[in-house]
Image (cartoon, rainbow, N blue to C red):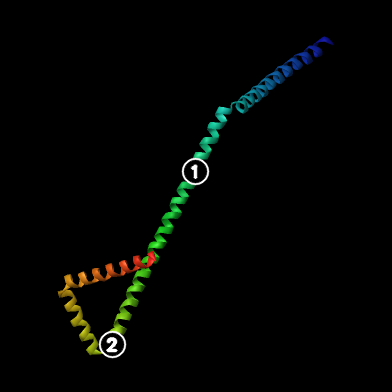
Amino acid sequence: MNHQPQRDKTANDLGELREQAEHTRDELGRTVEALAAKADVKAQAKEKAAELREQAAGLQEKAAEKTAVATGLVKEKAAQSAVLVKEKAAQAAGLVQEKTPDPVLERAEVVADKAKANRTPLLAAAAALAAFLLLRRVRRGRR
């Protein structure tokens, strides 16, 4: 009778040993896979390169969004400034016309009409004046 419980115990011990061996094999397999992955430098480099590409793409996308927002703001400010400048110019023109005596305005219109009618001689005179000033400056630079 003594032999029966000992056989059961041995059988249980064998079963436990098999389970432990299987468990140890599984752990050893995972450890070997982990070591192989760490030793595979090429694969690690590829993974790191893929991560960096994703980060760069994300940063590029964010930069593009910020640029678009900034461009929109700048355009909006420019449009507001243009409207403001036009308003101020109209106010200034109105003020000048209001403060300028009528005889001066009439005379300015006559001069403007004559200048429009005689553009060629006026342009020639302006070119001659520019050439004279340029020559004078060049000659003073030689002294």
The dot on residue 7 is none
Residue sitting farthest toward the front: 143
State whether residue 1 appears in this view. Answer: no
Residue placed most toward the observer, 49 or 6: 49
Residue in the picture at 26% in, 90% down: 101
Q: Is residue 121 left or right of residue 95?
A: left
Q: Nearer the viewer, residue 35 or 79?
A: 79
Q: Which residue is mark 1?
A: 56
Left or right, 47 with respect to 124, comes to right
In the rendered structure, which amino acid carries the disc numbered 1? Ala
Pick the quarter of the image with the N terminus.
Answer: top right
Label 1 SS: helix
Residue shown at the point (32%, 69%) measured from the top left: 136
Task: Classify 99 as above or below 68.
Answer: below
Residue found 58% across the figure and 28% down from its top = 41
Q: What is the x, y in percent for residue 113?
A: 17, 78
Mark 2 / mark 1, whichever is N-terminal: 1
Left or right: residue 85 compared with residue 1: left
| Circle 2: element type | loop
Name the residue carrying label 2. 100
| Residue drawn 72% across the image and 20% down it | 20
Could you tell whether 97 is left or right of 114 in the image? right
**Mark 2 nearby-residue class (10 Å; few <14, some 14–19, many ≥20):** few
Q: Nearer the viewer, residue 143 or 71?
A: 143
Cα distance in 3D space between marks 2 and 1: 64 Å
User: Where residue 87 appears, x then y in whole percent?
Assistant: 33, 76
